[in-house]
Amino acid sequence: MTTLPPIFTQWFDSRGWHIHPHQQDMLEQSQAPALLLIAPTGGGKTLAGFLPTLAELADGQHTGLHTLYVSPLKALAADIKRNLRIPVAEMDLPIRIEDRTGDTSYTQKRRQRADPPHILLTTPESLALLTSYEDAPRMFAGLQRVIIDEIHALSESKRGDQLMLAVSRLQSIAPGLRRVGLSATVEDPQAIAHELARNPDPCPILLADPGPDPNIQMLITDEKPPWSGGGAKYAIPQVLEQVKQHKTTLIFHNTRAQAEIFFHNLWLANTDDLPIGIHHGSLAREQRERVEAAMVNGDLRAIVCTGSLDLGIDWGDVDLVIQIGAPKNVKRLVQRIGRANHRYNAPSKALLVPANRFEVVECVAALEAVKEHDLDGDPKGPGPRDVLCQHILIRAAAGPFDANALYEEVKTVGAFTGLDRAAFDDCLDFCATGGYALRAYDKWKRLLQNPDGTWQLRDPRAAQRIRMNIGTIQDTDTLKVRMRGNFKPLGEVEEAFAATLTPGDTFLIGGQIVRYEGLREMTVEVSRRADKTPKIATFMGTKFANSTQLSQRILRMFQQPDWPQLPEHTAEWLTLQREVSQLPEADRILVESFAYDAREYTCIYGFAGRNAMQTLGMLLTQRMEELHLHPMGFVATDYATLIWGLDPVPDPAPLFRAPDLREGFENWLGGNAVMKKTFRGSATIAGLIERNLPQARKSGRQATFSSDILYDTLSKYDPNHLMLQITREEAMRGLVDFGRIEEMLARTAGRVDHVKPDHVTPLAAPLFLEVGRIPIKGAAQERLMEDVAAGMMAAAGLTEL
Amino acid sequence: MASHSFTLCDTRCQALPSGALLLPDHDTLCVSDLHLGKSDRIARRGGTMLPPYEVQATLDKLQSDISATNPATLICLGDSFDDLTAAQSLSDDMQIWLTRLQAGRRWIWIEGNHDPGPVDLGGSHLAQLTIGTLTFRHIATSQKAEVSGHYHPKFQIAGRSRPAFIYDASRLILPAYGAYTGGLSANHPDLRALFGPQPIAVLTGAKAISVPVTNTRRPPRFPGRFG
């Protein structure tokens, strides 16, 4: 147990604060090798994590790094630094606190390695980078504690796996290291504790008082929400009214593009000139920091934002959270609402604004789930091996290593406890030689085994390349955007989006409409232009998947004879669906077929979750291709798959025969777009594809070629290669999710209803604006390319050629 | 094979969907930018270890073009090897395979910027070669009636980008034939500068598809919400 020095008690008293029970518990159990605190947002969670550190450092005896704090967001690290320096300054404690993220300057970073502060605040990627340096053992030698904030958010992705691998490294360097996890309310604390602790150490879980239930409602507007669309433009007047009535409002969106459009429309309606800002991950750092600073000073009445503001940042006076669009996930909604009224034991206030009628249903279902404390989540699989490959390379960059020791170290990580030696050796072999059946790289191995059995990089210069490729976040390549003749960047857009622009096109960024002028080096040059309606900025944000639990609630709601809990417009909309078609049922598959805009559409309501519905789209379009129905593409949501093509589907029932689907699945798994996408992600993480080569991006020509080529080549010549195994595992677990297709087939047992309405139906309409459409590169594609080419030849007067 | 036939400076040409060029009147097949040994070169220079199967994949493709056309002359139009070391370190079975493909026909290695010197494999090494009215060299010059490679042209229609032949009345540039090759858009200024106002692109793939190279990247609007 760590006792609090008297100066702390005096400081608490001077502020009129009392130490929370869970903060006291954290002090009492501070010697535990691993400790997980579950506390609601605003519960003094971060201070609870840091109190033992501050107490241990108060006497000024410790030299070097004492506590490492890791958070998923750069902004959070900066925020914590600010907040932590206040008590340290007021109590005049001899403690140095610094942060280190991708935004930290080069000189500062160098100095931190030579002379680390007592408390270092960082992100998983920056930590992984630190462990890749030869001097890592010296820097971390005296490390006492590691605090992982928002561990529930990290554990949802590979970032968490990478972080825990890095922590296992730190534990070997500093055997006395104690681990602390801070988490928001989650459905399965035990699973997070297992990931946090060094296996097989125990990990006590402390539960803070969850506080009062939040006050969440759906915003009722005079204007009816549209049938489809994600903008929620109809709700602007009411949202503005709410902003006026509250001190500070956060307005969350599910994607960056939606945030930009909403912000733009909000400005047009903001006749009172209320100070409103925008904050999302695509904006330039300077701009984000300006908004953050204005927010902290209380200069802003509202901030339009995305998930980049989602996690535990203490914004002080936020008294209302507005969620635009359906929250998709009950757990995330609850955590997000914790932003409002950031004081312990005061209920948070939040409003949901559905963007369309379907989302009204989703919002009501989510509200019911919140009321019943029914949090959702899916169990995680074993530790991903692409992340392990990257970890092995990072280890190699730090200097020679012993494979046995590394294997034992990796096994202490919760997610990798089940890793067998053969699987580990496969990863090591992949890192060393590429792991190909054709042993082509004996001369040019990346890792060599020394006579003493240790492994090291063949070419020490490779360490630099490994460092540049650290990380597991799969972002698409982005380009900076800036005003012509001005150095200051406005933000970033995806390369794919930039490629669709021609000079004169307009798009929204940072809340202003700009005109595309041209591409200069790797920067998109724009000019100010306010007189045109913008081309929609299609840069992506995180796309959330709706949880199974929420889907089931919605299906149950559909079966009600009427809907007293829904607003009248939405009840009418569902009634209309029932009239022109029918409402989907849990034990039947509903299929609608209709023609629209020169394409034949088929909409399948399977309610199996986005990933499974996507796989179903793959399998059905493949079957349709065989039947010469010329499918051209599809899009999937959590509820439905919409397929379009050149020919109508006469009878869908045979498409759903389980044996055919299973057989199709086996054949399909080899050569499809989802697999290629998964391969690209895993191959980048594992270091087969490099993302940040110094010069490669600049030319973008002969040097680079598509990862699809690698996938096809491997599939053909080395089908059992480790990267293909990983791709398959990943896809089965995440993007493919065939298990839920089986579940859907079982619950519907061949009961397929086919409806052929004359128009797009109420339920199908939202799918038309769904992003993430997947094209089918089949006969229709060839036919269409030929048609387009012939048309262009004719237009150019070249038909005789 | 759905190839695209055209005439360049009075010589009949066929652009094959694979990216090879056939001169039917001269019984000649021409491929450019094979970049054999690319994965070897990348690994040697400390880059990543790409699947070392691109030689096999490229020769597989070449073999099927050769057996379909059985040409008397085969021209490799430069950058056949990713560098000269890659040519030397070609594995024995790949060398044997190449020798087998060379058997019974004239085989010309035109030198490219990646493989500027002779390689220790069968065939003749030339800086350039003239067949019929056409001159074959690796990098385009201002001379007319010229067939070259080097730029790895590609072109996009209906949202799909593919390696493509680009030609006008006086020159033809071949797409890269090798498995591990990227490409340069036919609209890139470097490529556009080589051609007159209206070059034609022939996209490779399942069929060879010809299309005018338009200045705008956007194809004309055609019906269908989701292309």
Image (cartoon, coloured by chain):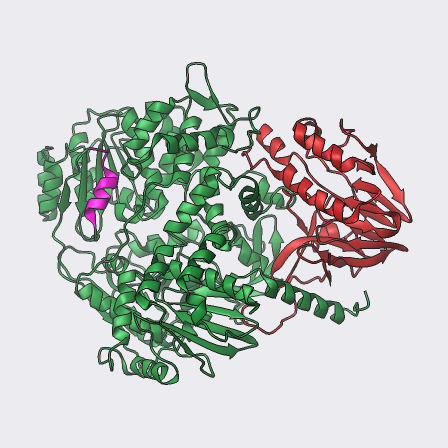
Q: How many marks?
A: 0
Residue A75 vs A585, above or below: the answer is: above
Say which quarter of the image contains residue B50. Answer: top right
In the depicted view, which residue is nearer to us: A161 or A727?
A: A727
Residue B20 vs A791, above or below: the answer is: above
Say which quarter of the image contains residue A92. Answer: top left
Magenta portion: prevailing SS class: helix
Residue B162 vs A67, above or below: the answer is: below
Q: Judge from the rendering whether residue A313 lies leftward or rightward of residue A673; answer left or right.
A: left
Residue A359 vs B67, above or below: the answer is: below
Q: Judge from the rendering whether residue B27 lies leftward or rightward of residue A523; answer left or right.
A: right
Q: Can you give x and y, in whole percent of width and height, for residue B40 in the image? A: 61, 31
Q: For chain B, what colour was chosen?
A: red
A190 drawn magenta: yes
Q: Judge from the rendering whether residue A499 lies leftward or rightward of residue B95; answer left or right.
A: left
Residue A677 shows in this picture = yes
Q: For chain A, what colour was chosen?
A: green
Which residue is found at the position 14% from the left and 60% from the top?
A346
Quadrant containing the N terminus of chain B is bottom right
Quadrant containing the C terminus of chain B is bottom right
Q: Can you give x and y, in whole percent of width and height, for residue B5 in the image? A: 80, 58
Q: Can you give x and y, in whole percent of width and height, for residue B95 in the image? A: 70, 30
A801 drawn magenta: no
Q: Which range of residues does the magenta coloring cover?
A: A188-200
Residue A19 shows in this picture = no
Q: Judge from the rendering whether residue A351 lies leftward or rightward of residue A544; answer left or right.
A: left
Q: Can you give x and y, in whole percent of width and height, for residue A546 in the image? A: 33, 62
Which residue is found at the position 60% from the left and 45% from the top?
A705
In the depicted view, which residue is nearer to us: A430 or A79?
A: A430
